Amino acid sequence: MARVYNFSAGPAVLPEEVLREAAAEMLDYQGTGMSVMEMSHRSDAYQAIIDAAEQDLRDLMGVPDNYKVLFMQGGASQQFAMVPMNLMQNRVADYIITGMWAKKACAEATKFGTANAIASSADKTFSYIPDCSDLPISENADYVYICENNTIYGTKFKKLPNTKGKLLVSDVSSCFLSEPVNVEDYGMLYGGVQKNIGPAGVVIGVIREDLIREDVLPGTPTMLTYKTFADNGSMYNTPPAYGIYICGKVFKWLKKMGGLEAIKGRNEAKAKILYDYLDGSSLFRGTVVKEDRSLMNVPFVIGDKDMEAKFVKEASGAGLMNLKGHRSVGGMRASIYNAMPLEGVQALVGFMEEFEKKNR
């Protein structure tokens, strides 16, 4: 069967080049006579894989020397607890609620201290990013937390909040490596890789060294402290070895594509094609205010559930897969991550034009 255009929000499309390389190495990785999937994580061959992956990520993001890169498990959702367990020294943190994942992170943090929702866009179904230029930051807040790109609702912080000197912690799961970032703007950023970087099962954290402490909250398990990962090169226990190997291949692919500035240009070009069509359509409409639109996740609606179901079904038949919106909001959503080719977005828009002609 031919490859389809996969618009899934995660696990999501990976570069075909990476998949072919991994397939070629499945039975014999570089003359070792075995797959990375069955290789000891204590072997020299695997150490070289994880070291190269970390270095390539540092190169891509410009990670300063005083930040650690941690390869962890448990997905972004486990970070909802790990962040307060490790960083909530005063037992106070401020959260900006721009969607389901920030809301869940805030709720989890209340188990460890006071989590203040200091801004929210819930009043308009999270269709915009609130003004974060002059927030009521708590005087003794340990950090300010955001979900930078909201996968379900399709919004993105184009400007980071003014934290008034407090640490910024950001969940970047669905915009990870989609554009250049200034790592020093963050105390910590982290993301599950299954949207824009690799297979499900790995979460990558980039954290400033002075935030990696021994004096975490009492009762924090060994495996939930950042120090455990930092002190052991992310290999205190068996890491998600094969997932990290694929991430490493994606990092090399991104370098080959010209790095994050080049990939941002590609992503902007793809998103423009889809948003321009939505802005001119009389059948479909986007759900996000223009200035806060994500380059990665594009939700749209028709406003008629039967017609939307028909669209998703017919699109699938045309090889345009996983366009159904998140179960909590309905409608449709096209996730157009780094690995989605321009041709995929063009094919989607072409299909939408035909559908609109037939169903006006």
Image (cartoon, rainbow, N blue to C red):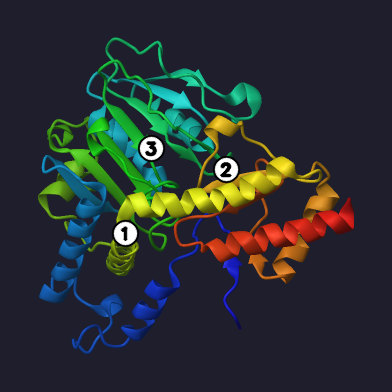
Determine contact: label 1, label 3, CB under 8 Å: no
Q: Is residue 324 something that shows in the picture? A: yes
Of labels 2 and 1, earlier in sequence is 2
Q: Is residue 310 something that shows in the picture? A: no
Of labels 3 and 2, earlier in sequence is 3
| Residue at figure coordinates x 59%, y 33% from the top left | 290
Residue 69 vertical position relative to residue 135 in the rendered view, above or below: below
Residue at the disc numbered 1: 258
Query: In this image, 192 relative to 41: left or right?
Result: right
Mark 1: secondary structure: loop
Using the image as rendered, state which of residue 153 and residue 46 is in the foreground. 153
- Give amino acid for label 2: Ile
Circle 1 packing at 10 Å, graded few (<14), some (14-19), many (20+), is: few
Q: Position of residue 279 (x, y in %)?
A: 69, 40
| Residue at figure coordinates x 38%, y 37% from the top left | 80
Residue at the disc numbered 2: 152
| Residue at figure coordinates x 20%, y 42% from the top left | 226
- Give amino acid for label 1: Gly
Q: Position of residue 166 (x, y in %)?
A: 26, 20
- Give amino acid for label 3: Phe
Residue at the disc numbered 3: 80
CA gap, disc 2 and disc 1: 29 Å
Marks 3, 2: nearer the viewer: 2
Residue 331 vertical position relative to residue 117 in the rendered view, above or below: below
Mark 3: secondary structure: helix
Q: Position of residue 247 (x, y in %)?
A: 32, 63
Based on the displayed image, in which of its 4 quarters is residue 38 positioned? bottom left
Q: Position of residue 125 (x, y in %)?
A: 64, 29
Residue 294 vertical position relative to residue 136 in the rendered view, above or below: below
Q: Looking at the figure, which quarter contains the N terminus?
A: bottom right
CA gap, disc 3 and disc 2: 17 Å
